[in-house]
């Protein structure tokens, strides 16, 4: 009897929340349209992979050997050399942001080369340090390759003793940044629904005074929590399907772990995210504050501190600790592993347990904010 | 069992707090409350399962339809499908909402919302029904309907109802009345036994021809030491004298006008109790006064004669297919108090918003002080004052900050600003440091008035300024209004308290966008016909219902005609 | 009193009221100041692409002097920290998969023998590619360390070889290519925009919801006055937040500032005005606070992504690069970075002003017009 009453009340409340959600077009916008836009923006717009980066090349010494070396730059798909007559002109271009770097062959290059003392100067614009590092790597790679070819052709190749680095990148052989951005996107979208949609739910009922009438009914706080979660869970799951389809067919990110596990983990995190939104909403009782708090406490940290683009292994210990408090970080680790590495059971169990722990904690806390008391 | 009990008292009397304690939403600081045999603080859920409660701002989900709102509450109370069909049919019938089941609650008029709120609390027959001021902001027709529903249910289902209200005619319908003030119980008893408290103190006076009833009323109400209360009614003035005051003393005050005793009413007893309590507490408030001089008794007959300051001709406003205001015409003269009455959703607020330039008219001519405010130069707006329907000043600013802002917005600054702010603070007896949002209703309303008067406007627009305000505060409010009118300020006001129409020089009654009656209160009462002319409330109901009946028969005749044509 | 001074007085009163409503509530006061400072500090430390004591494991089957010597070079750098020493190749997957280490260096048994024989001795580096940019950075640094190790190996036999070529690198404006220098200045614009946008988007919507906007419209204030009065506090708060972040970057993180504060603030003012313009337009369109917030959220995400905050605009496909011209944040970030790091003068960043000012001149009058003309 108790259970059947619970179920029927719950059904009524879920129906109500679903209707309210669907009637407001802006909910549909944030819940469904925004994720689609984000998938496309993230997939295509966010890329760490430098392509056709313009660099100025200043040849102050103009021998055939040099031209051969420098021509290596043209072969690179990452670089777009611009031939410039003088250093001052090149510097102007760099200053104006027209080129990202300057390759300068000094006047005495040929002379010095004969002495085995040759130098090429590379100037990069450090404002964009990522691009700058990449350009450095590509320029030296291209020049060395050209040198190698030349040496092979001339038969002057000397292989002295030396260590060669044989690089193997697991999980992402081509170092394609889309591969780690797209799984991270799932984290962001799941966070977004919680932060932007559910954070307003309880605050709105407080502001509009609807909670007072609801309180004086047989409704239990837990039923309110569950009913507010349910419709947004559905939205989250639809978004998840969008993400998975895009990952698989649009961006061709490998899914090395089991699809079932990916879905399970995503749903766990979705619950955490929705509950954080509800908790903020219930605590602030004010839509303005709730939205600000959700942005500051939930969304921004998930974007910046969860290991989405910035690897947490690089940050100071204090930040690592903070980052590890965020549920988003745990889900980020989990989802990247599931996509790129595979079913890594010990890690999966650990991270899922952490997410479950957050769910329980948050349900208890949210339920408390809905205890039937005013004032 | 099967009883109606009323909780009456001014703002801040503790009515809402008391209701919330009964529902288990607030914990009493000390003492215990037992509802239906359960201790509220120990078993709140048990009580919440058995009672129904309608808060002041009933929490309807405005984005859900009427039907969906009802279904939600029925589901929550575990009403079975079979019971529901019959119950809903009956509720929809008595609330007259059957036509609107698929309309979102947000699109209902205020009165319909209240009825739907009531229906939601009645999806099953609760053991106890708590209603917190269910009739605030509701027009007389809806108010009458609401009470008919309540009384019907009390009789048929033996419902026990506790209702808080500011209307004494509502309290009169209850079996028992509790009078609260400042958290204290002043008196309790049946309406009849309470009414007796005012026995022998109630009188009425007919003003001499050419003298306005409201001027007499003003003079009486200012004489606090001998008069407890006075209101204009049906062209005369009803008043209550202090116990110690002698009739000749009063007649002297009225320059020899003859006063006659009249039968006491519950409202008289209520006003008397409040005055006694306030006097005992030593915090009697005097009405805000515009000038220190007492109201003059000379009639200001230049009003009617003077050129109209507001002219409205064939004003129309449509929202899509819906015509909110339909070819309305009227004029208002300088220094006149003009009342705009009508049921919820009649188009009063729309008319108002067009007059103030907040909404463009679909067609028709509109002139306020010779200008259309919508596209008038900004200086023209400096000549009007506007007090919106619900409190619309900045709640988190202090009284002084609000006043200073609006003074600045109206172009006052420097020393002039300071003196004006100080003047209105003094005049309306406001605490400049108090936070506006936390003021009790009556004070909020005073503050809103104060803000609207800072720049000494020629015309003052007041949209339902007295909704949700207790009788005491309303008396003070009207005292201010009559003073202003005497000073030559033109006042346009809407209200749901029909007795307040008696303060107006002329009134217009609007329904469904159309103007049904226009004239002095007396003329309008006479227009309503004899059966309704008793007081303004019944005159209003009469006029609106006669019109609706006429429309209905007209529509029926039309449809018959069409049927005939089709056949 | 002249018309102009009365015009200005009215605006001042509105500004005063707006500021009071925003700042009076201790909660919203806190929400406007504390988070910006906190985020600036957190992200200052947290938002970095630079390796910092990245953990790695070693599988050294050669157990030789040469491998030990090379490892000491790698461990001696601030970038890496050895977390484990493995004994068999079977242990590698566990190390990488669990994320315990970023990479494993594996030396074959004949490592030293090959070196001594004057041959090329391979070292294998196995990287965790789940974050490909970190993996790439690690490989690059290890490669550079090995290159210098090779040079020291051969220095005694200094080969007079023309393929012996040195690339001398210099990075302007950010000599050590620290990613913090790149990201932090961008935050001056990005973090403050988040809140100014929301603040301005709510300013009118809140008044509409609470019914106070009508009260404002019946006063003699013109829409332009209301617009100016409502915008200025948001702009001021945005600039204040920017200033906090700027100070944190300059004095806490000690990133040297090369540009003139004047140009910086001219840029920030234009940027904030553009952001507030967008916010005010949202506000004027919205019926209530909820709508205003959701519209803002709908906008904020694409604005942040297409701004160059996380990844350079130049890496985006052509059509998205075109779309960024509507994004004030893109130019705000570009301007702030260039003025802060490059010391660019007004002339060099002049172009950045154009899209921001165009946006402001479109959105602000639109908002003012919408105040009165939004259909009810």
Image (tube, rainbow, N blue to C red):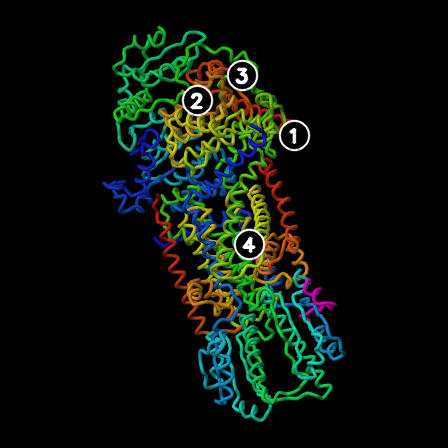
Quadrant into which the N terminus of chain B falls: top left
Residue B93 image-quadrant placement: top left
Q: Do the dots labelled 2 and 3 sit on one chain?
A: yes
Spatial separation of the CA atoms under disc 2 and disc 3: 22 Å
Q: Residues within 10 Å of mark 3 (few under 14, many from 20)?
A: many
Residue ID for mark 3: B333
Q: Secondary structure at mark 3?
A: strand
Q: Residue sitting at 52 percent across and 19 percent down?
A: B517
Q: Residues within 10 Å of mark 2 (few under 14, many from 20)?
A: many
The answer to whether residue C306 is visible is no
Q: Earlier in the sequence, mark 2 or mark 1?
A: 2
Mark sitting on residue B566: 1
Q: Secondary structure at mark 2?
A: helix
Pointer 2 and pointer 3: residues touching (CB < 8 Å)?
no
Q: Secondary structure at mark 1?
A: helix
Spatial separation of the CA atoms under disc 4 and disc 3: 58 Å
Instruction: Name the chain under label 4.
Output: C
Taking depth in this image into account, of B127 and A237 the one nearest to the observer is A237
Residue ID for mark 4: C189
Q: Residues within 10 Å of mark 4 (few under 14, many from 20)?
A: many
Q: Do the dots labelled 4 and 3 sit on one chain?
A: no
Residue B522: image x %, image y %? 46, 14
User: Is C257 left or right of B12, judged from the image as shown?
Assistant: right
User: Is A15 left or right of A135, judged from the image as shown?
Assistant: left
Instruction: Name the chain under label 3.
Output: B
Q: Nearer the viewer, mark 3 or mark 1?
A: 3
Quadrant into which the C terminus of chain B falls: top right
From what the image shows, is residue C77 above or below residue B354? below
Q: Nearer the viewer, mark 4 or mark 3?
A: 4
């Amino acid at each position: 009897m108790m259970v059947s009453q619970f179920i029927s009340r719950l059904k009524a409340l879920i129906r109500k929340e679903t209707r309210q959600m669907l009637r407001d077009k802006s909910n549909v916008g944030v819940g469904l349209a925004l994720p689609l836009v984000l998938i496309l923006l993230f997939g295509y717009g966010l890329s760490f992979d430098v392509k056709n980066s313009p660099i100025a090349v200043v040849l102050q010494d103009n021998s055939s050997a040099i031209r051969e070396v420098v021509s290596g730059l043209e072969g690179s798909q990452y670089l777009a050399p611009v031939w410039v007559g003088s250093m001052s002109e090149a510097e102007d271009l760099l200053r104006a942001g027209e080129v990202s770097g300057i390759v300068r062959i000094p006047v005495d290059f040929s002379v010095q080369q004969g002495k085995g003392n040759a130098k090429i100067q590379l100037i990069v614009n450090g404002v964009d340090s990522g691009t700058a590092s990449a350009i450095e790597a590509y320029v030296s790679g291209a020049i060395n390759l050209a040198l190698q070819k030349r040496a092979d052709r001339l038969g002057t190749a000397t292989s002295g003793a030396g260590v060669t680095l044989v690089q193997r990148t697991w999980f992402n052989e081509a170092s394609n940044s889309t591969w780690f951005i797209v799984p991270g996107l799932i984290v962001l979208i799941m966070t977004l629904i919680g932060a932007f949609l559910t954070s307003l739910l309880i605050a709105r009922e407080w502001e509009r005074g609807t909670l007072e009438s609801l309180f004086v009914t047989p409704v239990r706080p837990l039923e309110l929590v569950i009913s507010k979660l349910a419709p947004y869970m559905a939205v989250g799951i639809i978004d998840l399907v969008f993400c998975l389809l895009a990952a698989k067919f649009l961006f061709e990110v490998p899914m090395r772990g089991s699809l079932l596990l990916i879905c399970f983990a995503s749903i766990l995190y979705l619950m955490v995210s929705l509950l954080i939104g509800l908790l903020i909403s219930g605590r602030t009782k004010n839509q303005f504050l709730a939205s600000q708090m959700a942005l500051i406490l939930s969304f921004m940290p998930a974007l910046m501190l969860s290991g989405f683009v910035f690897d947490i292994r690089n940050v100071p210990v204090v930040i690592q600790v903070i980052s590890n408090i965020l549920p988003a970080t745990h889900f980020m680790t989990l989802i990247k592993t599931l996509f790129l590495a595979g079913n890594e059971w010990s890690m999966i169990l650990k991270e899922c347990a952490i997410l479950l722990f957050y769910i329980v904690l948050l349900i208890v806390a949210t339920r408390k904010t809905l205890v039937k008391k005013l004032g | 069992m099967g009883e109606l009990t009323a909780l009456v008292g001014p703002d801040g009397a503790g009515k809402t707090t008391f209701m919330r304690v009964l529902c288990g939403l607030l914990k009493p600081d000390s003492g215990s409350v037992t509802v239906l045999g359960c201790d509220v603080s120990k078993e709140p859920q048990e009580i919440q399962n058995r009672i129904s409660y309608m808060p002041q701002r009933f929490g309807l989900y405005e984005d859900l339809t009427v039907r969906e709102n009802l279904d939600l509450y029925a589901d929550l109370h575990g009403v079975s499908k079979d019971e529901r069909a019959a119950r809903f049919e009956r509720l929809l019938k008595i609330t007259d909402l059957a036509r609107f089941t698929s309309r979102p609650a947000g699109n209902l008029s205020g009165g319909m919302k209240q009825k739907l709120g009531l229906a939601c609390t009645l999806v099953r027959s609760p053991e106890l029904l708590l209603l917190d001021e269910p009739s605030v902001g509701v027009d007389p027709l809806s108010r009458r309907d609401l009470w008919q529903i309540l009384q019907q249910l009390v009789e048929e289902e033996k419902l026990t109802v506790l209702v808080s209200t500011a209307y004494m005619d509502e309290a009169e319908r209850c079996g028992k009345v509790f009078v609260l003030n400042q958290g204290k119980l002043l008196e309790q008893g049946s309406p009849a036994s309470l009414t007796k408290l005012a026995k022998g103190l109630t009188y009425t006076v007919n003003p001499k021809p050419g003298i306005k009833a409201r001027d007499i009323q003003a003079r009486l109400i200012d004489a606090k030491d001998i008069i407890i209360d006075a209101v204009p009614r049906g062209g005369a003035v009803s008043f209550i004298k202090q116990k110690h005051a002698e009739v000749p003393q009063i007649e002297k005050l009225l320059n020899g006008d003859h006063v006659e005793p009249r039968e006491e009413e519950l409202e008289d007893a209520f006003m008397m109790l409040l005055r006694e309590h306030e006097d005992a507490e030593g915090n009697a408030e005097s009405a805000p006064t515009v000038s220190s001089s007492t109201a003059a008794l000379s009639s200001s007959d230049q009003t009617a004669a003077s050129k109209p300051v507001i002219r409205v001709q064939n004003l129309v406003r449509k929202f899509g297919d819906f015509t909110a205001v339909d070819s309305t015409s009227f004029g208002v003269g300088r220094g006149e108090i003009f009342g705009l009455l009508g049921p919820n959703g009649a188009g009063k607020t729309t008319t108002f918003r067009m007059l103030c330039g907040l909404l463009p008219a679909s067609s028709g001519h509109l002139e306020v002080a010779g200008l259309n405010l919508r596209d008038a130069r900004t200086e023209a707006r400096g000549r009007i004052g506007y007090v919106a329907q619900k409190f619309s000043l900045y709640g988190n600013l202090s009284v002084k900050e609000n006043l200073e802002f609006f003074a600045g917005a109206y172009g006052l600054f420097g020393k002039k600003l300071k003196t004006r702010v100080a003047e209105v603070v003094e005049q309306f007896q406001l605490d400049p440091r108090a936070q506006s949002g936390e003021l009790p209703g009556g004070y909020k309303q005073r503050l809103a008035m104060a803000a609207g008067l800072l720049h000494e406007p020629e015309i003052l627009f007041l949209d339902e300024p007295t909704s949700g305000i207790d009788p005491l505060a309303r008396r003070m409010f009207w005292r201010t209004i009559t003073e202003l009118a005497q000073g030559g300020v033109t006042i346009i006001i809407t209200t749901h308290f029909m007795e307040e129409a008696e303060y107006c020089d002329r009134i217009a009654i609007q329904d469904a966008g159309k103007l049904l009656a226009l004239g002095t209160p007396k003329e309008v009462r006479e227009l309503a016909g004899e059966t309704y002319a008793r007081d303004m409330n019944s005159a209003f109901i009469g006029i609106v219902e006669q019109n609706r009946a006429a429309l209905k028969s007209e529509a029926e005749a039309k449809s018959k005609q069409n049927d005939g044509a089709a056949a | 009193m002249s018309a102009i001074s009365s015009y200005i007085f009215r605006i001042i009163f509105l500004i005063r009221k707006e500021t009071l409503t925003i700042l009076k509530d201790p909660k919203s006061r806190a929400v406007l100041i504390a988070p910006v400072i906190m985020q600036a500090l957190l992200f200052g430390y947290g938002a970095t692409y630079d390796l910092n004591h990245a953990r790695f494991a070693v599988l050294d089957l050669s157990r030789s002097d040469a491998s030990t010597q090379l490892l000491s070079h790698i461990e001696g750098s601030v970038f890496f920290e050895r977390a484990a020493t493995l004994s068999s190749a079977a242990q590698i997957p566990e190390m990488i998969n669990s994320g315990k280490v970023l990479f494993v260096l594996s030396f074959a048994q004949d490592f030293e023998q090959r070196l001594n024989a004057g041959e090329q001795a391979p070292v294998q580096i196995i990287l965790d590619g789940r974050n490909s940019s970190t993996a790439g950075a690690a490989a690059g640094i290890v490669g550079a360390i090995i290159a210098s190790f090779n040079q020291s190996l051969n220095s005694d036999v200094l080969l007079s070889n023309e393929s012996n070529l040195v690339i001398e690198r210099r990075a302007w404006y950010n000599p050590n290519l620290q990613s913090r220098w790149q990201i932090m200045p961008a935050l001056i614009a990005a973090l403050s925009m988040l809140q100014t946008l929301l603040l301005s988007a709510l300013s009118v919507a809140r008044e509409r919801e609470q019914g106070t906007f009508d009260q404002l419209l019946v006063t003699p204030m013109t829409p332009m006055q209301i617009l100016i009065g409502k915008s200025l506090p948001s702009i001021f708060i945005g600039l204040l937040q920017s200033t906090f972040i700027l100070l944190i970057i300059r004095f806490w993180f000690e990133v040297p500032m090369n540009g003139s504060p004047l140009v910086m603030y001219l840029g920030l003012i234009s940027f904030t005005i553009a952001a507030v313009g967008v916010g005010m337009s949202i506000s004027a369109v919205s019926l209530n606070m909820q709508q205003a917030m959701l519209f803002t959220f709908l906008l904020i995400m694409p604005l942040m992504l297409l701004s160059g905050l996380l990844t350079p605009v130049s890496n985006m496909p052509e059509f998205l690069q075109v779309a960024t011209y509507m994004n004030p944040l893109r130019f705000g970030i570009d301007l702030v970075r260039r003025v802060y790091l490059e010391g660019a003068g007004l002339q060099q960043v002049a172009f950045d002003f154009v899209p921001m000012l165009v946006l402001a001149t479109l959105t602000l009058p639109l908002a003012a017009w919408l105040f009165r003309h939004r259909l009810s």
